[in-house]
Amino acid sequence: MQLLSYQRGSRAKVLAALLLGVMAIFVAKLFYLQIIKHSDYVAEANAEQVKPLIIPAKRGLIYAMDGSNTVPLVINQTVYTMFADPLTVTEPDKVLNVIREVAGGNLRPHPEDLLNRRDTRYQILGTKLTREQAEKIKSQNLRGIGFQEESQRVYPEGSLAAQTLGFVNAAGQGQYGVEEALNDRLTGHDGLLKSVTDVSGVPLTIGNQNINKPAQDGDNIALTIDRNIQAYVERALAAGLKRSGATNGSVLVMDPQTGKVMAMANLPTYDPSNYGNAKDASVFQNATISTPYEAGSVVKSLTVSTGLDKGVITPSSTFYNKGIIRVDDTTIQNADTSEALGTQTMQTALTDSLNTGMVTIAERLGDDSHITKESRDTIYNYFHDRFKLGQLTGIELAGESPGIIIAPGSVQGNAVRYSNMVFGQGMDITMLQMTSAFSSIINGGVYYTPTVVAGTVGGDGGLTPSDPKPFTRVVQAKTSKDIKRMLEIDRHDNGAIDPAGYHVGGKTGTSQALINGRYSFTQTVGTYIGFGGDKTARYVIMVQVSGKGKNLQGAHDASPIFGNISNWMLRYLKIAPKG
Amino acid sequence: MSYQTQQFYTSRRRAPAYGSAGSWNRNQNTVAFVSSVRLGPVAHTVLIALMITVLGLVYLTQATRATSYDYEAQKIDNQIADLSTKKSDLEVENARLTALETVQKSKVAKAMTAPAATDYTR
């Protein structure tokens, strides 16, 4: 084939050269853009097109028990915040009419003023709108009105077990109770969706850097709290406070065979769905675990158990009661120095709550006439090491206080201190510590670590029980049998009338309130702790009542609340009477 | 560019092949086909360009189809989210209706009477 040849300086040749030059410029520019600046433009494109979307994890729900079933105490609900862009709203009158009609109770005050503002493009008009309300307003196609979806905690049972549950603050963090203590488990882990999106933000599957990491929702936790017991206990406590004139009260109900807390009630309380309305932050505290106090004579049950277990006393052992007893340079006296004078049994010392009897036990743990170092070591071993008083129990609730037990080796851990401790003064313990210790002495001698978590609830609603908590033997079975019988006699001889055919026992406690470091003679705290069941103790109930300037007695003010709850528990647990 | 349209079939019975002159063996093909169409370099270039175009169209079609699936998936995701919200609302309503206070205030509960006596199975 013969090739065409251009004439020198021809227009075609010039045009070809020109085109070649332009093409060379294009190639050079494309090389610069696509090769040299490749990574820069890819990054710029990704920044614009690839959007990371956080997939929020759902906070775990909290359940209570209803017999052997689980029922929700805390659940999540999607609610909507309604906002407006005042500069975009074109029909303010129509907007006002619609939102007032549909979401009147959820609107912020004076929405007309909010819509008339011209210095902002974001005004919240209403909060916590339900899905139905939001859908109705959306259907009106109001220009300039938008909705923001959020999740809120809902409490179908109202303020039931409020201090045990706690609440979730505006930042999504659990506060107080289970919500705070198990915040990590309840929160879960957010997921991530990172992909190329279109202009509407719809994720597309194009691109090779897409990430789709699903959210891991928080655990649904079932508490050991029984809804029915909790509700009854709260009603009984409220009635008891009204009857006694006390302003504050707490009740703790535990299964002594497992350490599971069946109810925890404190008054006054609050509504967790409106926690911001609480006037006093102290109502958020769960007094049964966070307010240690001198529990008083209920501790005598532990002192007698220690004496029985060490073999220095039996229920029928005797001592001589003078109404007072001397320890070093201090005189210890009974509440009534003229009561039960003369030779008395240890059963009487417990039934009549004689401080002198308890000091006698402490002396017998030593050289029989003094509270020696050996005696104090033994008491400390039982109270602190075995019964776990004065230390955190590790219950799954925020705000637990360890309390204080003075060790015998310290300066303050002298004989006078220990002579007070054996009848419940000179040490601060929580109701949870006392209830756990008391459970161990009446259940056969085994200390169970207290717990409020029964397990986790799966998507199918099934309960997966938690791993069993550790337990240790703290007193001999014989000791447990003896003290259980002594406590039954104590309750019976003090005039309590329980349904026939059941084993119910307990001990009163009345302790002087410490005000500014001094014991008050006008303000006392009434306490009662006891158990009930058939041959096997099925529940332990501890009641405490108090009030500023109130002289409250364990026998008169706390014991009736115990009796009320105990009688109901026997029926609720369907315990058959003996005979 | 020219095309030869004639085709030639050569019988192997007639042509000497495979070693022995003029002989053929059992199970051997007896007809060989030789295409008489011959493509020049321009035709090759055009065909390759066409193939690339077709492949490009196929790719674009698939990419567009994948993107359309994304929109369908997004619609389904939105429906799932909507149904999930409705389910949560129903769960909340169910929890409220079965709450102790609601049950205790119900007509059924108010109509209940305390048992006169209780027997236990032993």
Image: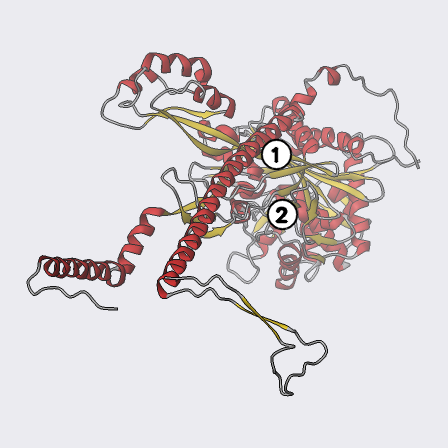
Q: Quadrant of the N terminus of chain A?
A: bottom left
Q: Amino acid at mark 2?
A: Gln
* Structural distance between the alpha carbons of marks 1 and 2: 26 Å
- Image location of residue A87, percent across then percent down: 26, 23
Q: A72 or A293, which is in the foreground?
A: A72
Residue sitting at 44 percent across and 52 percent down? Answer: B59
| Vertical position of residue A409 compared to residue A94: above or below | below
Q: Nearer the viewer, residue A404 or A149?
A: A149
Disc 1 to disc 2: CB gap under 8 Å: no
> The disc numbered 2 marks a residue on which chain?
A
| Element type where label 2 sits in the image | helix
User: Could you tell which of marks 1 and 2 lies nearer the N-terminus?
Assistant: 1
Can you identify the residue that label 1 sits on?
A: A73
- Mark 1: which amino acid? Leu
Q: In the image shown, does B42 or A420 lie closer to the viewer? A: B42
- Residue A302, given in percent of the width and then of the height, sits at 69, 49
Tag 2 residue: A433
> What residue do we see at 74% from left, 59% from top?
A310
